[in-house]
Image (cartoon, rainbow, N blue to C red):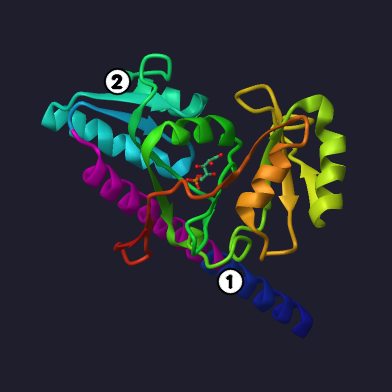
Amino acid sequence: MLLKVYAATVLKHSATVKKLCRLYSSCVKMSLEQAKQVAAYRAVDEFVTNDCIFGVGSGSTVVYAVQRLAERVETENLKVTCVPTSFQAKQLIVKHNLTLGELDTSPVIDVTIDGADEVDSNMTLIKGGGGCLLQEKIVASCSKKLIVIADYTKDSVKLGDRYKKGIPIEVVPLAYVPIQKKIEALYGGEVKLRKAVAKAGPVVTDNGNFILDWLFTNQDLDWDKVSNVIKMIPGVVETGLFVRMCHKAYFGQPEGNVVERQ
Ligand SMILES: O=C[C@H](O)[C@H](O)[C@H](O)COP(=O)(O)O
C-alpha cells in the first residue's frame, strides 16, 4: 500500500516537472523569436530606402525582415527590388508580393540583410546552418553592405564558442570523401556529411551539391587563410566562413532591446 502511494506521488511530481520544463522551453523559444524579430525590424528600418536593390538572406530570422519590408513597401509606397539568396528567400519575396530581381539585371546590390549561425568578435561569420551559403556569399559579394540580423545566442567571441555544429562547406557530391579526408589532414577535427531529416541520405543544396560540416577543434585559426585553403581543394564550391564581409550586426536581446556591433 505504502509503495503504491509512493509511486503515485512520484508520478504526480514528474508530470508537474515535465509541465514546467515544457513551459520553460516555450518561454525560451518565444524570447528567441522576439529577439530575431526586433533585430530584423531594426535593420530593415535603418537600411532599406526607396529605389534600393535589396539582397534577401535566408533562414528563420530573415522571415521577420521580409515581413517588415513588405509592411514598409505597402505603407510608404517604396520601390524596392529584392534579389534572393536561396529558394526560401525567393518564396518569401513572392509570398509578400515584393518585386523579384536577379543578379543578371541587378548585379550591384545596395544592401543585403541576412542571418548568421555565429558572429565572432572580428565580425567573422559562420553561415550555412540551413544549407544556403553559396548563393548567400555570391549575393553578399555583390552588395555594398552586408547586414547581419540574429538573436543573442549568435553573438560570440571566438567561432565555436556558441555554434557547435561546425563550419558548413558546400561540395560537389562525387568529391565529398576526399574533401573530408583532406580537411581533417590539414586542420584536424571531424568532417561530417550532413544528412537530411525527412529523407534518407544527404542534404542536397539549392545548387545540387552536398554539405560537409567541419567540427573544428582549434578556435585560433586564421579564418581568412583557412577559407581560402579549403576553397582551393578541387570539388569545394564554397565555405560558410564569411570573413571581412559583414558591415554591421544586430543582435536581438531577450529583454526586447537590440545590441549593435560593427
Ligand atoms: O544556411 C542558412 C543561412 O546561412 C542562415 O542565414 C543561417 O543559418 C542563420 O539562420 P537563422 O536565422 O535561422 O538562425
Query: Disc 2 residue type?
Result: Asn
Q: Residues within 10 Å of mark 1 (few under 14, many from 20)?
A: few
Mainly helix, strand or loop, the magenta region? Answer: helix
Give, as a single range, the part of the protein colored magenta: 21-49
Query: Disc 1 residue type?
Result: Val
Tell me if residue 33 is in the magenta stretch: yes
**Viewer-proximal residue among 83 and 198:** 83
Q: Quadrant of residue 8?
A: bottom right
Q: Residue at x 43, y 26 (%)?
A: 84
**Label 1 element class:** helix
Any part of residue 197 in sight: no
> At which x and y percent is residue 138?
51, 30
Task: For marks 2 and 1, give the CA distance.
Answer: 45 Å
Any part of residue 262 in sight: yes
Looking at the image, residue 78 sits to the left or right of residue 166; the answer is left
Q: Quadrant of residue 98?
A: top left
Q: In what quadrant of the picture does the C terminus appear?
A: bottom left
> At which x and y percent is residue 215?
74, 54
Tell me if residue 87 is in the magenta stretch: no
Sequence-first disc among 2 and 1? 1
**Viewer-proximal residue among 242 and 165:** 242
Q: Residue at x 61, y 75 (%)?
A: 13
**Label 2 element class:** loop
Residue 97 - label:
2
List the residue tagged with mark 1.
17
> At which x and y percent is residue 184?
84, 50
